[in-house]
Image (cartoon, rainbow, N blue to C red):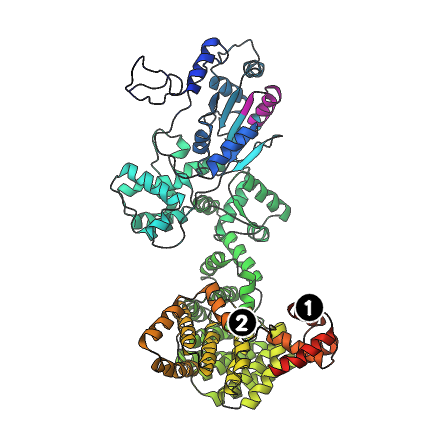
């Protein structure tokens, strides 16, 4: 096979006349310049890779573009991310490329010799080598690829700057784990390959660069390799954080191990990811060696912070790093900057993390250092402080989850690491984790965790609160006997303690359990006792929510007037101060009450108001969508009613929420005649349409029904209330006192009213209310 005399590209056979020696006109011109002495043929030709280049469709043209506009470009990234391969691919097609491989250069003073060798210069002992490089490069156009600069970074930076200032035809492309920090340098940070989302669809999985690289390298060793199961392949790529070297090393195991066993082996990544190419640099033959190369370049303080951060599996912010590393805050901040600059941690917004393979290496160093227990202890204490103390009643879980919402993986690790401590901190961390799971609609594992924790630490001061939380989860799962038993244990545990907040939370939980058990009169008693415990504390939101729970219980026993009075008192406060879960529950009860009073439009307003409070696909929204289905039954739109009922049922199915209880019985009873009155095809069509409604489409469907009815009445329930009080002549402070909200909130409502109605004066708003709202 004939090849180009300049670049080595294979040439096509055949044709008439003298065989060509060059692959293109560009190579013919290069050969001419070499013969004429304008560009001597020095240095070895740029080596071509023997395997395919996968991915980097965005990065490759970007680096090439930078090389055309900047004279010094540095590709920066962690070890094994593919800096060298990207740089090699990027420079093909450029004139005068010379490669200086610096990984074998042991000392900074030897960098000039490496550059001279790359340029094909003869060594002249009597000549200063820097001056000789200058003489060689001053009149030439050269693109110098400095590969692997990090261990001789100071020398590379100094020499590159010195030559670039004096050689106008010189350009430099460097690869390094940190920037050269030279004036005029353009830094291109190379990240991991894209990884698949969770799922089992092979076509979707193979859209990611990481999966395509795995398959390509696996098939180079085993042409019969099939990427099945696709979900396992996706998880392997995610566990390896899209790091190309790690993916290639894992793919080499595909000939001997099935994908599930490769995934299992990633529990010890550094042991599995070995046996790379025999001709690769030693640091690329196994993952640990690649990371060790970077680790050796750290000073002792950087190494200490690097290994201690490995306990934070879910990433960290600066405050978390300071707490866990146990060093002076200024020192930790400086070390974080240094580790990011050296590509050993990566930034994502205001948080940082170690890539999984790098974290595995750091964890081994932490275990070897003897600091593992102390570092884990600091991490647990920091998360416990972040969670804070339970501050209920009624929703202390939300307050616990608030501080640690973004620390899910770290919280799981902290709970596991404090199991043997059997102290209050372990219970608090378990409660915080259960609260996070509750917000993620995962009541079953949360309940199991709390049950284990209460049994493990029976003497904890948080025992009663943990029992109450476990009882709530049992009620959510309609486990009546367990819920009632746990709730009674919680009340018993709290009655002997001087903690009214904790007692109120336990009483509220007991009332909920009694409601689930259909003992409504007893629930009313428990709710009223809870309110009497809370009222003297002066806690506005908690008192309002206790008033709501009494209203709910009264509604359940048929005291509609009492329920209406209690709701009118607590709803304005909950709108201003309540949590989303509290307000959505109260609005649902208000809507159900309006339905019972045959106020269909009022019921619809309350059910729709929940859209502004909680996510459309959440468990809190499902009963309100069912309420809207009952509204449509009352209006006679049976198809729409069935569609809404199916949409709510779909949410319950996805979140594993049992459709049982008095409310669901009522919904089923009201929708059953609709099924009987419609044709089979109409029923099937409505249900199919409802099951397909999610997210924004579901929101649009909910709102579409009221658009025509309320075209002349665009205000929300609260805005209509404010407008009515304006019409009565009340001032903003008087409205604020009446609704128990701040003056600023009233002013904001008035601004929205003016914008929606196009009316600027209070008098015109009053006229609008008189003419339209009161007649609605």
Secondary structure, mark 1, is helix
- The number of numbered badges drawn on the structure is 2
Q: Dividing the image into 4 quarters, which one contains the N terminus?
A: top left
Question: Which tag, 2 or 1, sits closer to the chain's start?
Answer: 2
Q: Relative to residue 466, is residue 255 depicted above or below?
A: above
Kindly tell me whether residue 496 is visible in this rendering.
no
Percent from the top left, x then y, of residue 236?
37, 48
In-image side of 162 versus 478 (left or right) = right
**Residue 374 rendering spot, x and y as whole percentages:** 52, 53
Q: Secondary structure at mark 2?
A: helix
Q: Quadrant of residue 385?
A: bottom right
Mark 2 to mark 1 CA distance (whole Å): 22 Å
Q: Is residue 296 left or right of residue 577?
A: left
The residue that appears at 36% across and 41% down in the rendered structure is 213
Q: Which residue in the structure is indicated by mark 2?
A: 707
Numbered range of the magenta stretch: 156-171
- Residue 375 shows up from this direction: yes
Quick check: is 476 in the magenta stretch? no
Which residue matches tag 1? 751
Residue 159 drawn in magenta: yes
């Amino acid at each position: 096979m004939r090849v180009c005399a300049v670049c080595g590209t294979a040439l096509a056979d055949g044709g008439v006349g003298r065989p060509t020696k060059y692959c293109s006109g560009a190579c013919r011109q290069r050969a001419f310049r070499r013969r004429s002495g304008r560009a001597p043929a020095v240095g070895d030709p740029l080596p071509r890779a023997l395997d395919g280049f996968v991915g980097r469709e965005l990065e490759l043209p970007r680096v090439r573009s930078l090389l055309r506009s900047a004279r010094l470009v540095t590709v920066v990234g962690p070890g094994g991310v593919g800096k060298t391969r990207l740089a090699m691919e990027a420079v093909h097609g450029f004139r005068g490329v010379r490669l200086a491989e610096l990984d074998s250069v042991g000392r900074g003073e030897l960098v000039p010799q490496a550059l001279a060798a790359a340029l094909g210069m003869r060594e002249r002992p009597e000549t200063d080598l820097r001056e000789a490089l200058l003489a060689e490069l001053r009149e030439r156009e050269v693109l110098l690829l400095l590969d692997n600069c990090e261990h001789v970074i100071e020398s590379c930076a100094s020499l590159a700057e010195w030559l670039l200032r004096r050689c106008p035809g010189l350009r430099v492309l460097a690869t390094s784990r940190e920037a050269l920090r030279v004036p005029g340098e353009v830094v291109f940070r190379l990240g991991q390959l894209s990884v698949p989302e969770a799922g089992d669809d092979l076509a979707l999985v193979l859209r990611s660069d990481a999966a395509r690289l795995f398959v390509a390298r696996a098939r180079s060793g085993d042409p019969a390799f099939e990427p099945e199961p696709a979900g396992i392949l996706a998880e392997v790529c995610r566990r390896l954080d899209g790091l190309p070297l790690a993916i290639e090393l894992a793919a080499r195991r595909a000939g001997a191990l099935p994908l599930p066993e490769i995934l299992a082996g990633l529990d010890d990544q550094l042991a599995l990811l070995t046996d790379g190419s025999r001709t690769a640099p030693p640091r690329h033959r196994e993952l640990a060696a690649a990371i060790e190369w970077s680790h050796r370049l750290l000073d002792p303080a950087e190494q200490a912070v690097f290994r201690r951060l490995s306990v934070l599996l879910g990433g960290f912010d600066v405050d978390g790093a300071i707490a866990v590393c146990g060093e002076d805050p200024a020192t930790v901040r400086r070390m974080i900057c240094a580790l990011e600059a050296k590509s050993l941690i990566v930034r994502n917004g205001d948080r940082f993390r170690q890539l999984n393979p790098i974290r595995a290496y750091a964890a081994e160093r932490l275990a070897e250092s003897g600091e593992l227990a102390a570092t884990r202890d600091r991490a647990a204490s920091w998360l416990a402080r972040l969670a804070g103390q339970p501050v209920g009643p009624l929703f202390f879980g939300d307050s616990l989850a608030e501080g640690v919402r973004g620390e899910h993986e770290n919280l799981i690790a902290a709970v596991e690491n404090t199991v043997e401590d059997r102290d209050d901190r372990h219970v608090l961390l378990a409660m915080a984790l259960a609260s996070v799971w509750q917000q993620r609609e995962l009541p079953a594992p949360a309940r199991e965790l709390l049950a284990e924790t209460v049994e493990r630490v029976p003497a904890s001061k948080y025992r009663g609160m943990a029992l109450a939380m476990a009882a709530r989860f049992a009620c959510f799962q309609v486990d009546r006997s367990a819920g009632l038993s746990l709730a009674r244990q919680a009340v018993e545990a709290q009655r002997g303690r001087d903690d009214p907040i904790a007692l109120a939370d336990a009483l509220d939980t007991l009332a909920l359990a009694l409601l689930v058990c259909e003992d409504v009169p007893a629930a009313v008693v428990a709710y009223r006792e809870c309110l009497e415990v809370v009222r003297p504390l002066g806690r506005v939101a908690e008192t309002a929510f206790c008033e709501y729970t009494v209203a709910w219980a009264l509604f359940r026993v048929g005291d509609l007037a009492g329920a209406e009075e209690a709701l009118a008192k607590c709803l304005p406060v909950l709108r201003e101060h309540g949590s989303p879960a509290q307000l959505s529950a109260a609005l649902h009860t208000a809507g159900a009450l309006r339905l019972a009073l045959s106020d269909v439009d009022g019921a619809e307003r309350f059910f729709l108001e929940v859209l502004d409070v909680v996510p459309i696909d959440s468990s809190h929204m499902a009963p309100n969508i069912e309420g809207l289905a009952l509204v449509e039954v009352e209006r006679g739109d049976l198809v729409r009613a069935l569609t809404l009922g199916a949409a709510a049922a779909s949410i319950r199915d996805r979140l594993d929420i049992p459709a049982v209880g008095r409310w669901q019985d009522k919904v089923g009873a009201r929708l059953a005649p609709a099924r009987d009155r419609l044709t089979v095809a109409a029923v099937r069509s409505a249900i199919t349409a409802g099951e397909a409604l999610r997210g924004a489409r579901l929101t649009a469907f909910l709102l579409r029904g009221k658009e025509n009815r309320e075209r002349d009445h665009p205000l929300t329930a609260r805005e209509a209330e404010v407008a009515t009080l304006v019409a009565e002549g009340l001032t903003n402070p008087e409205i604020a006192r009446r609704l128990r909200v701040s003056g600023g909130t009233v002013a904001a409502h008035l601004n929205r009213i003016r914008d929606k109605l196009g009316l600027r004066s209070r008098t015109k708003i009053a006229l609008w209310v008189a003419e339209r709202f009161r007649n609605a």
